[in-house]
């Protein structure tokens, strides 16, 4: 994140953030709220009640037409033609060498209508790649980012908050909506695409709202959520929440030097996808990814649990205790407000990737003790 946000594009909700006293920061070319009050208070509100996020920096790209599904099967590593209408899938767009250009969520709105959600800094990369890759298919790519605002309500009270301002006819749909599903609904008088997705490890919803109605929907959610303990939350809380939940962030755990297999996300690569005749479907990066799957990775993404107080940060070296031999690098790290100790994600060499392995992180010249742990440090209670 950049602290100089003066040259970045303002969110459609910029005036609302200023009125709430948000500290603004540059992120992916946008001027976005870093925090409104306290990072920790916003984080804990999401875990215990709910938080309201502005995600309008994300990109929304429509792919539609009779061969939209086939085009996405070729363009992305996932099997998008197998996604049912009204459902969504986490996937990636890779280069020919198998490296990750971006991680995506793709929503299937109809048989021949998809929405691809890209990270803010990669919208142009994804748009260009999709446009090139659908050539030869009966499909059209349209960038809807300019006309779409995206807000999210995340936390255990999210369903109560959203349904309290949803049209009565749509409430049963919202309540029965499974994870990674979406539907059209009327919320605060606006027709939105409502999705049960998120980036915090909690239950919650993301609302794709026409830009001209974004302020109205934001205000209605903020007001409706107050009795439930909802607070506006910024990028800082979003980052610590996703870190606890073991969710990768592009530019940290994923980039153009990384394949899905190194990141422990090989499951999203569908090498088994076939055409109607049962022949393997070609897709960009297939040959490289097939080769990578069959070979041992040079590095592995792991979770780290700190056993002392000083946190690891992105870019810090992971070393062998005592010896100081560098065996990896931290990609993300912070104190965990929920768990009460430092957590991190790091790439390390495979021989030191087993859970329980004692390692250290060089924190400004001092070795701090860490133990290899699951990437997902926090799991939402089921009851």
Image (cartoon, helix red, strand yellow):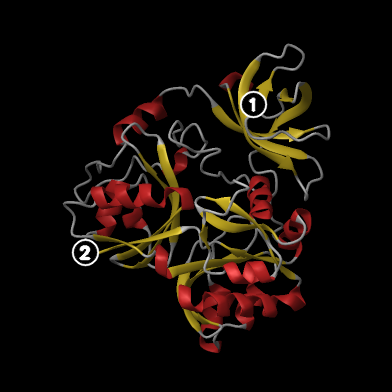
Q: Secondary structure at mark 2?
A: loop
Q: Residue furthest front?
A: 6
Q: Is residue 234 left or right of residue 261?
A: right
Q: Is residue 72 above or below residue 216?
A: above
Locate residue 13, reporting x and y percent: 56, 69
| Closer-to-camera residue (247/373) | 247
Q: Is residue 64 above or below residue 354?
A: below
Q: Is residue 305 left or right of residue 32?
A: right
Q: Are marks 1 and 2 in contact (CB under 8 Å)?
A: no
The residue drawn where x is 53% and y is 75% is 214
Total number of numbered discs in the rendering: 2
One can see residue 111 in this view: yes
Sequence-earlier tag: 1 or 2: 2
The residue drawn where x is 30% and y is 47% is 129
Q: Nearer the viewer, mark 1 or mark 2?
A: 2
Name the residue that disc number 2 marks.
Answer: 66
Q: CA distance from mark 1 to mark 2?
A: 47 Å
Name the residue that disc number 1 marks.
Answer: 354
One can see residue 383 in this view: no
The residue drawn where x is 48% and y is 58% is 58
């Amino acid at each position: 994140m950049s602290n100089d946000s003066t040259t970045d594009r303002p969110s459609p909700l910029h005036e609302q953030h200023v009125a709430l006293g948000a500290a603004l920061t540059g992120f992916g070319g946008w001027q976005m709220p870093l925090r409104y009050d306290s990072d920790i208070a916003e984080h804990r509100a999401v875990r215990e009640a709910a938080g309201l996020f502005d995600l309008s920096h994300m990109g929304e790209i429509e792919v539609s037409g009779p061969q939209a599904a086939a085009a996405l099967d070729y363009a992305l590593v996932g099997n998008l033609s197998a996604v049912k209408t009204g459902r969504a899938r986490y996937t990636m767009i890779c280069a020919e060498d198998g490296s990750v250009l971006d991680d995506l969520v793709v929503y299937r709105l109809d048989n021949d209508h998809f929405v691809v959600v890209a990270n803010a800094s990669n919208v142009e990369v994804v748009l260009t790649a999709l446009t090139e890759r659908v050539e030869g298919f009966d499909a059209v790519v349209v960038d809807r980012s300019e006309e779409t605002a995206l807000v999210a309500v995340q936390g255990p009270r999210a369903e109560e908050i959203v349904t309290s301002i949803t049209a009565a006819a749509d409430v049963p749909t919202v309540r029965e909506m499974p994870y990674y599903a979406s539907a059209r609904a009327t919320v605060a008088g606006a027709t939105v695409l409502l999705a049960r997705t998120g980036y915090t490890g909690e239950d919650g919803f993301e609302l794709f709202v026409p830009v001209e109605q974004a302020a109205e929907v934001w205000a209605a959610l903020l007001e409706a959520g107050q009795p439930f303990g909802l607070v506006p939350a910024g990028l800082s809380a979003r980052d610590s929440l996703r870190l606890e939940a073991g969710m990768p962030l592009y530019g940290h755990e994923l980039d153009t030097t990384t394949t899905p297999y190194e990141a422990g996300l090989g499951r999203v690569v569908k090498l088994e996808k076939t055409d109607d005749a049962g022949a393997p479907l070609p897709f960009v990066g297939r040959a490289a990814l097939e080769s990578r799957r069959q070979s041992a990775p040079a590095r592995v993404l792991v979770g780290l649990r700190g056993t002392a107080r000083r946190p690891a940060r992105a870019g810090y070296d992971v070393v062998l205790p005592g010896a100081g031999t560098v065996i990896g690098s931290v990609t993300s790290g912070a104190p965990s407000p929920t768990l009460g100790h430092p957590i991190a994600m790091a790439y390390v060499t495979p021989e030191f990737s087993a859970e329980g392995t004692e390692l250290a992180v060089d924190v400004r010249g001092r070795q701090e003790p860490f133990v290899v742990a699951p990437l997902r440090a926090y799991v939402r209670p089921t009851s």
